[in-house]
Amino acid sequence: HLFHKIWPPSVINYQFWPKNPPSYREVNEEYGTHVRGFADKVFRSLSLGLGLEANAMKEAFGGEELEYMLKINYYPPCPRPDLTFGVLEHTDMSTLTILVPNEVPGLQVLKDNHWIDAKYVPNAIIVHMGDQIEVASNGYYKSVLHRTTVNKEKARMSWPVFLEPPPEFVVGPIPQLLNDQNPAKYKSKMFKDYAYCKLNKLPQ
């Protein structure tokens, strides 16, 4: 896989960007512009769904300082797909994950204790809600448990963009959602500390 940050400009390091094809930088910068516009609409909808101001959810994660990490995954064909997974089951520690899949199926989500294949829809974008959305909404929205499988005959690719708060930005339940009947269910902590615990399988 390949990954690098595509926004904001202060965190972009072009030395990690491929030099070939020559159009890679231009295409990804344009793609990043469209992803940010799309993400703003999703954040707005999530905020309004909680009865909050339209910008509340995005601001809960750093606003315009949100960091966009692009990852390109390549899963080669596997002669025994029954013996392995592309990625084991997990939730994303991001706020949102915006995913462009290819036509080879492989993404599965857990629903009602059953693994369901995510149907490929041409020109559609898949959006995962991550751990930070669950924390900020105080559990109203749930982080999506998912995994990826491999294909016996075809290679699979995906292009997720992970939207993450700045490392030292503190994320916690949005205060307007809390009251005596609905106290905070999650701790407030810097994103880098959350990420450290998640990656090292430590309690949050």
Image (cartoon, rainbow, N blue to C red):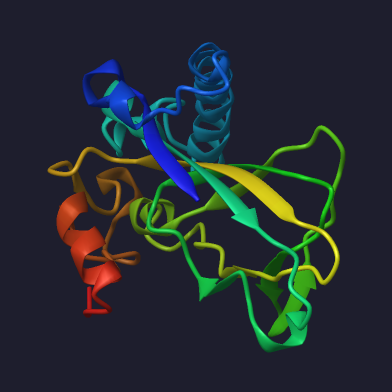
Residue 100 lies, in percent from the top left, at 67, 40
Place residue 4 in its image quadrant.
top left
Residue 16 lies, in percent from the top left, at 34, 32
Residue 65 lies, in percent from the top left, at 26, 26
Nearest the viewer among 95 and 117 is: 117
Residue 156 drawn above or below residue 72? below
Place residue 14 in its image quadrant.
top left
Residue 3 drawn above or below residue 178? above
Place residue 166 in its image quadrant.
top left
Q: Can residue 171 be seen in this view?
A: yes
Decide if residue 23 is on the left or right side of residue 63.
right
Residue at the far bottom in the pictured view: 83
At x 56% / y 63%, what residue is drawn? 144
Residue 126 drawn above or below residue 75? above
Nearest the viewer among 88 and 181 is: 88
Residue 142 lies, in percent from the top left, at 51, 62
At x 17% / y 41%, what residue is drawn? 169
Q: Can residue 190 be seen in this view?
A: no
